[in-house]
Amino acid sequence: MGFSKDAVEEAKYLFRGSTEGYEGSPGAQKTASTPTSTDPAVATMFAIKAKRYGDGILQIALPKDLQDVSVGVTTNVLQTLERDVVVDLKPAEFTKRASVTIAVDQARGILKNMGVNLPARINEGDMNALLESTPKLTNEQINSFYKQAAALKPKE
């Protein structure tokens, strides 16, 4: 089971872990879709994994950033672990719209202060085990994460 459409609509924030300037996979380009997560710890894991290719970042979009965009759950078999939500925008457009972008190490620091310790590097083969073993954040923790991230580096 994954998130219901109601749960997606209730999400206050969508988080995307990536690298600076990455415009998404060929599939994301072709389908004009961006995978995101409702859990900043999950998105931070993807940003850590992506650091192999450049400067890891965590982007945060608010409902106001995506008012005219379709958002929904995926059929991804790992959807429940990843808390995956697809935004019908190319990743470059999501980047332009995101209210907050911070460095992955800033995101790791916020999570560490919340008691969620993520490694500095994540290899492809380690991702599923890490997703399974990392506790899912509560709504209160997610709100706190957002407030701390927005205070670090708000988008101008």
Image (tube, helix red, strand yellow):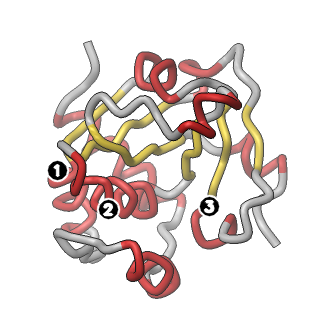
Element type at mark 1:
helix
Residue shown at 45%/62% (left/top)?
42
Residue shown at 51%/40% (left/top)?
25
User: In the drawing, does residue 117 fall left or right of residue 41?
Assistant: left
Query: Would you name the residue on which mark 2 appears?
Result: 49
Q: Label 1 amino acid? A: Gln
The mark lying in front, picked from 1 and 2, is 2
Return the disc, 2 or 3, that comes first in the chain's sequence.
2
Element type at mark 3:
loop
Measuring from the top left, give residue 81's x and y in whole percent: 60, 72
Query: Would you name the residue on which mark 1 appears?
Result: 106
Dividing the picture into quarters, in which one does residue 34 lie? Answer: top right
Q: Label 2 amino acid? A: Lys
Measuring from the top left, give residue 56's x and y in whole percent: 24, 47
**How far separated are the C-alphas under marks 1 and 2?**
15 Å
**How far separated are the C-alphas under marks 2 and 3?**
17 Å
Return the disc, 1 or 2, that comes first in the chain's sequence.
2
Query: Would you name the residue on which mark 3 appears?
Result: 83
Return the disc, 3 or 1, that comes first in the chain's sequence.
3
Residue shown at 31%/54% (left/top)?
50
Compared with 119, 69 (above or below) is above
Camera-nearest residue between 83 and 62: 83
